[in-house]
Image (cartoon, rainbow, N blue to C red):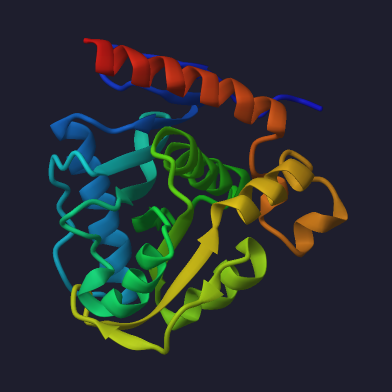
Amino acid sequence: MTEQATIASTEYEDIIVNQDNYGIRLTDTAEGRNSASLLISKMYAWRGYAGTHQFNDDPNRITLTATDNGEVIGTLTIGIDSPIGLMADQVFKPEMDAHRMRGAKLCEFTKFAFDTQVKSKTALANLFHLAVIYARDIHNCTDILIEVNPRHRRFYEHMLGFQREAEMRNNPRVNAPAFLLRVNLEYVTEQIGKHGGTFGSDTAERSFYPYFFSPREEAGILNRLLRVDHEQHAA
């Protein structure tokens, strides 16, 4: 099977997933965060969502961006639970606290946007998978939470295995209805092990996991990320 991607580093971002002219990187520069903000504003305005979508230099939030020939085509931010909580607490705090009480370490995926002109399922899956690796292996999270508009709920439930945590409520940050969905990272890991990298199979019609990296590719990415994380803490 052809390897989907390799890992390299640059002077400005810690990680890039390279495939021809396409890449995914950890965005830790003002310029990178601004490019991600512009894409989110464009996508959210097209869907009629309100609110501002600027990125702050928050140590509990990690922003990944996908680029094609240098243009930002996708972005996703990982929020790691901390004493100040997560953005979803604004609307769904009782449900979030119930999982904290059972000992879960939560994270949330927010500001997820992908240029609608880009049709590559693999590019979208690569971005999501890299976020999973950060959450699970670098920050030891146990569960991913995501607030989604009702029109997107079925994709997350049927293609990624998320489960609904509460009834639909209004999200004041975007002035739109939202469901709180959750998936346990043990389940995600199991699905990646079974289906990752098999995107030509029949399973790809029923699941998004075949478009994720293969277990071999995931191991290489994780080793690179762990080295970078160690270097950052040693500096």
Q: Nearer the viewer, residue 117 or 88?
A: 88
Q: Percent from the top left, x then y, of residue 52?
A: 14, 63
Q: Position of residue 29 (x, y in %)?
A: 18, 29
Q: State the count of labels.
A: 0
Of residues 138 and 204, the one drawn nearer to the viewer in this rendering:
138
Viewer-proximal residue, 68 or 25? Answer: 25
Q: Residue at x 13, y 39 (%)?
A: 57
What residue is at 73 percent from the left and 38 percent from the top?
A: 197
Where residue 146 sits: x, y (%)?
41, 65
Placement of the N terminus among the 4 image quadrants: top right
Q: Residue at x 76, y 25 (%)?
A: 2
User: Which quarter shows the C terminus?
Assistant: top left
Q: Residue furthest front?
A: 102
In the rendered image, the vertical position of residue 38 relative to residue 26, given as above or below: below
Do we see residue 12 in this rendering?
Answer: yes
Q: Is residue 19 visible?
A: no
Locate residue 48 relative to residue 25 in the image: left or right. left
> Is 28 drawn above or below residue 37 in the view shown?
above
- The residue lying furthest to the right in this view is 202
Residue 207 location (% of width, % of height): 71, 60
Question: Residue 11: which quarter of the image?
Answer: top left
| Residue 232 in which image quadrant | top left
Residue plotted at (41% across, 58% down) = 103
